[in-house]
Image (cartoon, rainbow, N blue to C red):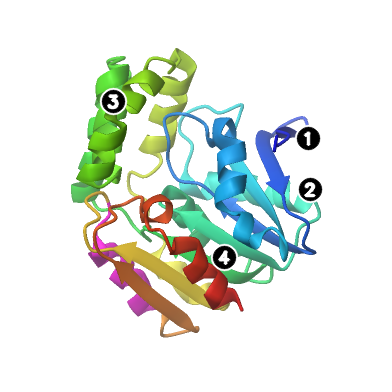
Amino acid sequence: MSIKINCYDDGNLKMKWFCFGSGDKPFVIIPGLSVKSVMESADAIAEANSLFAEKYTIYLFDRRENVSAPYTIAEMAEDTVTVMKGLGLSDITLFGASQGGSISLVIASAYPDMVSRLILGSTSAHITPEYYSRFAKWVELARAGNKTELYLTFCNEIYPEEVYEQYKDYFIDIASTITQDELDRFIIFAQSLKGFDITGKLSCIKCPVLIIGAYDDTVLDTDMTMEIAEKLEETTDIKLFVYNGYGHAVFDTAPDFKQRIAKWLE
């Protein structure tokens, strides 16, 4: 499999995206904060999500290419909506992981008629100063140009210890390929989390929501997951599931994560 990387360009906004699958229903994935663009992992992502490929056409969107600071979560959401509308997508199943979940919450609250189902993985509706301090540490490493320390710190905090130790040498190799442009973009994207808060608009979300978190999430702990569930259960149908032992990146590490989503979508 070789996934084609496309670039939406309307003269103002440039955003890379790709799609795979043959189904007639749109399934949109918005990935989390990363040092390296997920576009480089398109084939692996398609393989990991092949379970949905018969029923859906899966779209994955990156962040804006022509980016400058400050760039807020709300602006990321608006940019993603612009591209989705440009591609003619509607009645979408929307899955957001980590920062992508925050973006998805903004989209689902601002454009409720556009989203038919919402799936959230290890995400938050607001970032307190306490939690932003963890992202600020990554920003400082990126500003200092400490590529290896940044990437190892990032991976050590999002993955369980056994996964981190197993792939540590691989992470070191990846760190050596990080460019200055990638560091600059990472800083802008990470800073967007400072002061983010959409809790007051969660009541605008009307579609069914699946919320998945992890008890051992050291980036955004289960308090964040539970807060979203408590707010949304007042206005819409939700299902909550919390793993243990798979870390913040449970959406990549839990072996039955995709199957759990598929079952909920039945």
Q: CA gap, disc 4 to disc 2?
A: 18 Å
Mark 3 or 4: the one toward you: 3
Mark 2 in CB contact with mark 1 (< 8 angstroms): yes
Q: CA gap, disc 3 to disc 1?
A: 34 Å
| Mark earlier in primary sequence (4, 2) | 2
- Give the residue at mark 4: 108
Residue type, label 4:
Ala
On the picture, is 202 further left or further right than 162?
A: right
- Give the residue at mark 3: 150
Q: CA gap, disc 3 to disc 2?
A: 35 Å
Q: CA gap, disc 4 to disc 1?
A: 23 Å
- Which of the numbered marks, if any, corresponds to residue 10? 1
Q: Quadrant of residue 109?
A: bottom right
| Mark earlier in primary sequence (3, 2) | 2
Vertical side of 87 occupied by 243: above or below: below
| Mark earlier in primary sequence (3, 4) | 4
- Residue drawn at point x = 41 percent, y = 85 percent: 234
- Which of the numbered marks, if any, corresponds to residue 86? 2
Q: Is residue 260 magenta?
A: no
Pointer 1: residues within 10 angstroms few (<14), some, or many (20+)? few
Label 3: element kind: helix
Vertical side of 198 occupied by 187: above or below: above
Residue type, label 2:
Gly
Magenta span of residues: 220-232
Evaluate whether residue 34 shows in this view.
yes
